[in-house]
Image: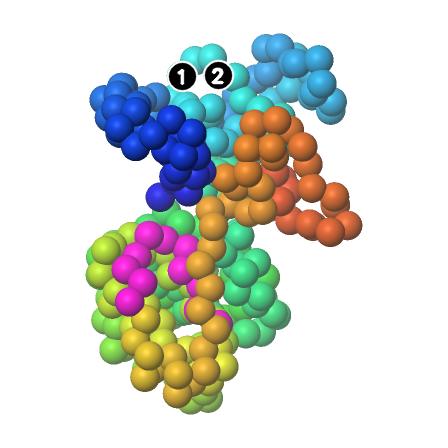
Amino acid sequence: SRPDLVRQTLEKARRDGVLATVEAVQNRLGQPMALGYSSAGTVLEVGMEVAGLQPGDRVACAGGGYATHAEIVAVPKNLVVKLPDTVDFESAAFTTLGAIALQGIRLAEVELGEVVAVIGLGLLGQLTVQMLKAAGCIVAGTDPQPDRVALALRLGADVATVSPDELQALVAARSSGHGADAVLITADTPSSQPVELAGRVARDKGRVVAVGAVGLQIPRKIYYEKELDFRVSRSYGPGRYDSSYEEQGHDYPYAYVRWTEQRNMEAFVQLLSAG
């Protein structure tokens, strides 16, 4: 789940040897770790190279090891976004999760009027449903928990069900029998059943995006016969797991990377501000 730490481990093994690396990893795993990766608060101080922020600004912060559940945190500049006065701290604390959901939607390349299915209606799923509706999509959702299905319907889903088989029927009814243009998997399970369900629900040449941590045993027959496009979303956007971006503050050129981690966070905050 942490490709950046895997790379560091491999580099250390090449440099210092396997035994020294194993010992270092075991020591690291045995240390307590600060909880949290998404927070909001007021700026106390800014570093010399930080532009656009000043003490007193209200901000949302992201990043494991940075935006922890603490009274005072130190966060790199590319993992901080300024908050409009209309966004309260409690809502802004969801910015990291919102950016993760938004990045999945971007990878799905959805368009106005498309039918999109969301598998898994936890936090990520509920945020995904609302943003898809804001984008003008017809949204179908499923989750084994009835209360999550009911919440998704209250938050704007066109149809939602606890039954995978019924999801397929609901999507077919909304798409004239063609299937979903895109399917976003926001579930959290080691099982590959969500991937299989996504294949059944999607239309020919549809797009499937795995946002949540799910099993990735892709059933060849389903995906081959429909020639589906399967994509894995890497957290909350370009820049994730790149230390030069996240830790050293080197941004990507706006013209070439329109939606980075930070710019996805900004977009989600703007959606919060607009209600």
Q: Nearer the viewer, residue 167 or 44?
A: 44
Between the residue at mark 1 and the residue at mark 2, the CA separation in whole angstroms equals 6 Å
Residue 157 x %, y %: 42, 63
Residue 230 vertical position relative to residue 240 in the rendered view, above or below: below
Query: Mark number for residue 70?
Result: 1
Q: Name the residue under label 2.
A: 73
- What is the three-letter code of the residue carrying label 1? Ala
Magenta-colored span: 207-217
Q: Residue at x 74, y 43 (%)?
A: 253
Q: Are marks 1 and 2 in contact (CB under 8 Å)?
A: yes
Tell whether 189 sits left or right of 91.
left
Magenta span contains residue 215: yes
Helix, strand or loop for the magenta stretch, by majority: loop
Q: Which corner quadrant of the image does residue 113 belong to?
A: bottom right
Numbered marks: total: 2
Q: Residue at x 55, y 38 (%)?
A: 242
Residue 156 vertical position relative to residue 46 in the rendered view, above or below: below
Q: Residue furthest right?
A: 255
